[in-house]
Image: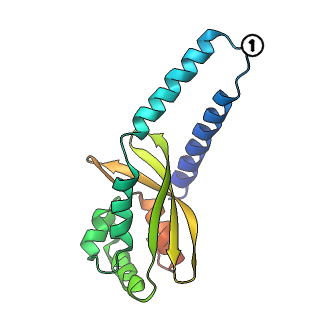
């Protein structure tokens, strides 16, 4: 499972770097460069528009809801049916240590993958986490590796 988060992080970093570079182009660049940059930016914006903060927030709300069933929680996690036992344990953890998540900025990785900075808060404070979401059968769900990262913070293992 380790290679995928690294690949996702590298892809997100590459997109961010490319975006930053296009904003710093010099006046020496020809018109062709500006046209290519505009086309790239437009494509990225179009893909990003395919998912909203509200759509991702709905999934996060279910994931952290202590009253959600294990099956409801599994439905918002990529391949969630494969980790039912740990999701059930996570539900128990949430009863004693409630967590919330607030989705912030979304970064497009590809047409079916986005990363969203998500502020995860608990009784002792919070921290922003980059969580990855995958589009599966037309629905955006929390990617396996992101769900497992959150679960590991509660000393739960997806393996």
Image x and y of residue 104, in percent: 49, 56
7 lies above or below 24? below
Q: Is the image coloured rainbow, by chain, by secondary structure, or in one colour?
A: rainbow
Determine the residue positioned at 70% across, 14% down. Answer: 29
Kindly tell me whether residue 77 is visible in this rendering. no
- The residue at the far bottom in this view is 96
Q: How many marks?
A: 1
Q: Which quadrant holds residue 56?
A: bottom left
Side of 97 where 80 appears, left or right: left
**Nearer-the-camera pick, 154 or 66:** 66
Q: Which quadrant holds residue 74?
A: bottom left
Q: Quadrant where the C terminus lies?
A: bottom left
Image x and y of residue 116, in percent: 49, 54
Mark 1 Cα shell of 10 Å, populated few (<14), some (14-19), many (≥20)? few
**Nearer-the-camera pick, 45 or 108:** 45
Determine the residue positioned at 40% across, 53% down. Answer: 53
Determine the residue positioned at 62% across, 10% down. Answer: 31
- To which residue does mark 1 refer? 28
Side of 18 where 105 appears, left or right: left
Image x and y of residue 6, in percent: 58, 52
145 lies above or below 137? below
Q: What is the secondary structure assignment of the residue under circle 1?
A: loop
Side of 23 where 106 appears, left or right: left
Kindly tell me whether residue 96 is visible in this rendering. yes
Image x and y of residue 33, in percent: 62, 15
């Amino acid at each position: 499972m380790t290679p995928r988060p690294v690949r996702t992080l590298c892809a997100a970093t590459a997109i961010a770097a490319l975006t930053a570079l296009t904003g710093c182009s010099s006046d020496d660049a020809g018109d062709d460069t500006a046209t290519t940059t505009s086309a790239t930016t437009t494509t990225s914006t179009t893909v990003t528009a395919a998912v909203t903060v509200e759509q991702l927030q709905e999934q996060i709300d279910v994931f952290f809801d202590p009253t959600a069933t294990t099956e409801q929680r599994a439905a918002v996690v990529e391949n969630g049916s494969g980790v039912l036992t740990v999701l059930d344990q996570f539900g128990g953890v949430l009863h004693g240590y409630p967590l919330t998540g607030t989705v912030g900025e979304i970064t497009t990785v590809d047409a079916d993958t986005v990363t969203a900075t998500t502020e995860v808060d608990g009784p002792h404070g919070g921290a922003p986490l980059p969580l990855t979401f995958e589009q599966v059968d037309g629905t955006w769900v929390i990617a396996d590796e992101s769900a497992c990262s959150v679960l590991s913070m509660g000393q739960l293992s997806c393996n």
